[in-house]
């Protein structure tokens, strides 16, 4: 978990398949047009068709949640140290606008 979202590609703690799944999630969120036939071919080296569909649906569902929570001004439930915090404390910790780890802003 320490390698997390920011350093997954270079981490020795993730398998090639896990890194590819994380890249799939990253592309779905930031550049879905880059997910082409060649990318799906690379996914097929590690995942079945059913697993690719399930992974894609799960990623899409979670991206939708982040977008939805951003419209509600929903702040992270956990502090950087892992404590469960109120929305008020989270707003103090993270600033005046909700954040996501990937973009710095929710939505």
Image (cartoon, rainbow, N blue to C red):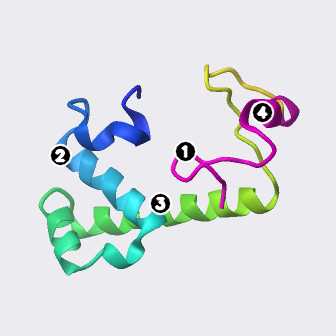
Quadrant in the picture for residue 31: bottom left
Which residue position holds label 3? 58
What is the CA distance from the residue labelled 4 to the residue labelled 2? Answer: 34 Å
Which residue position holds label 2? 16
Q: Residue at x 42, y 41 (%)?
A: 5
Q: Nearer the viewer, mark 3 or mark 2?
A: 2
Q: Residue at x 75, y 30 (%)?
A: 93
Observer-nearest of 60 and 28: 28
What is the CA distance from the residue labelled 4 to the residue labelled 1? Answer: 14 Å
Residue 100 rendering spot, x and y as whole percentages: 60, 48
Which element type, helix, strand or loop, lies under badge 2? Answer: helix
Which residue position holds label 1? 101
What is the CA distance from the residue labelled 3 to the residue labelled 2? Answer: 19 Å
Q: Residue at x 78, y 33 (%)?
A: 90
Sequence-wise first label, 3 or 4: 3
Sequence-wise first label, 4 or 2: 2
Residues in magenta? Answer: 87-107
What is the CA distance from the residue labelled 3 to the residue labelled 1? Answer: 18 Å
Which numbered marker is on residue 15? Answer: none
Sequence-wise first label, 4 or 1: 4
């Amino acid at each position: 978990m320490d390698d997390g979202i920011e350093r997954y590609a270079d981490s020795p703690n993730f398998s090639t398949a896990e890194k590819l799944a994380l890249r799939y999630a990253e592309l779905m969120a930031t550049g879905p047009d880059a997910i082409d036939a060649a990318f799906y071919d690379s996914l097929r080296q590690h995942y079945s068709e059913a697993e690719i569909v399930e992974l894609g649906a799960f990623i899409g569902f979670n991206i939708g949640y982040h977008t939805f929570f951003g419209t509600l001004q929903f702040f992270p439930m956990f502090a950087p140290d892992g404590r469960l915090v109120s929305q008020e404390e989270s707003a103090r910790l993270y600033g005046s606008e909700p954040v996501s780890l990937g973009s710095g802003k929710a939505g």
